Amino acid sequence: MILMYNVLFTKTKNCILIEVPDLDILSEGKNMHDAILMARDAIGATILTLEDNGKKPPKMSKEINVKKGTFSNKGKTIVSIVDIDMDEYKAKYDNKMIRRNITIPHWLNEKAKKLRINVSKVLQEALKDKVAMF
């Protein structure tokens, strides 16, 4: 799922100040490239937190007033849209583990124990291969 948000970038002498009004995010970057990466990461982390709390991410505002930005008096502000692929972001950062029960034949479980095979790891690897096909 690709999400997009308006982001205010304010250039100062020392850095680029970042504001994502729709998500109440404030951050900064060393330069414009870094600021875009920081904005994308902050958006992803905020969306994950919202989803963990059972909330849906807000839609992107249609209009942004640069003059109402938190940092509008700190330097020249521009508006740009920053996108994020939440499926990719989750695959990279949402690594909390959940417990799932599986059923396997007794003989297979005994053989795996004898060979000291980490069944959970094998299952994870197989599932990653399977979902990569889609």
Image (cartoon, grey):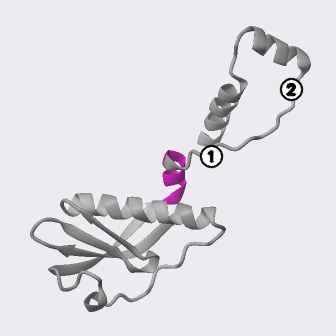
Helix, strand or loop at label 1? It is loop
Vertically, is 66 above or below 13? below
Point out residue 6 in the picture as x, y percentages from the top left corner. Answer: 37, 77
Vertically, is 102 above or below 113? below
Point out residue 94 in the picture as x, y percentages from the top left corner. Answer: 55, 50
Classify mark 1: residues with Cα within 10 Å, few (<14), some (14-19) or many (20+). few
In-image side of 106 versus 86 (left or right): right
Find out whether residue 53 is within the magenta segment. no
Query: Which SS type dominates the magenta stretch?
Result: helix
Classify mark 2: residues with Cα within 10 Å, few (<14), some (14-19) or many (20+). few
In-image side of 79 versus 53 (left or right): left
Residue drawn at 54 percent across, 54 percent down = 87
Give the quarter of the image for residue 82.
Answer: bottom left
Is residue 50 something one can see in this rendering? yes
Per the image, the residue denoted by label 2 is 104
Q: Which residues are magenta?
A: 85-92
State how far apart marks 2 and 1 are (Cα): 25 Å
Helix, strand or loop at label 2? It is loop
Give the quarter of the image for residue 15.
Answer: bottom left
Q: Residue furthest top?
A: 114
Residue drawn at 50 percent across, 64 percent down = 2
Point out residue 27 in the picture as x, y percentages from the top left corner. Answer: 31, 67
Of the numbered discs 2 and 1, the one sitting upstream in the chain is: 2
Vertically, is 132 above or below 53? above
Frontmost of labels 2 and 1 is 2
Per the image, the residue denoted by label 1 is 134
Is residue 1 something one can see in this rendering? no
Residue type (three-letter) at the residue carrying disc 1: Phe
Residue drawn at 21 percent across, 63 percent down = 32
In-image side of 39 versus 48 (left or right): left
* Image quarter of the N terminus: bottom right
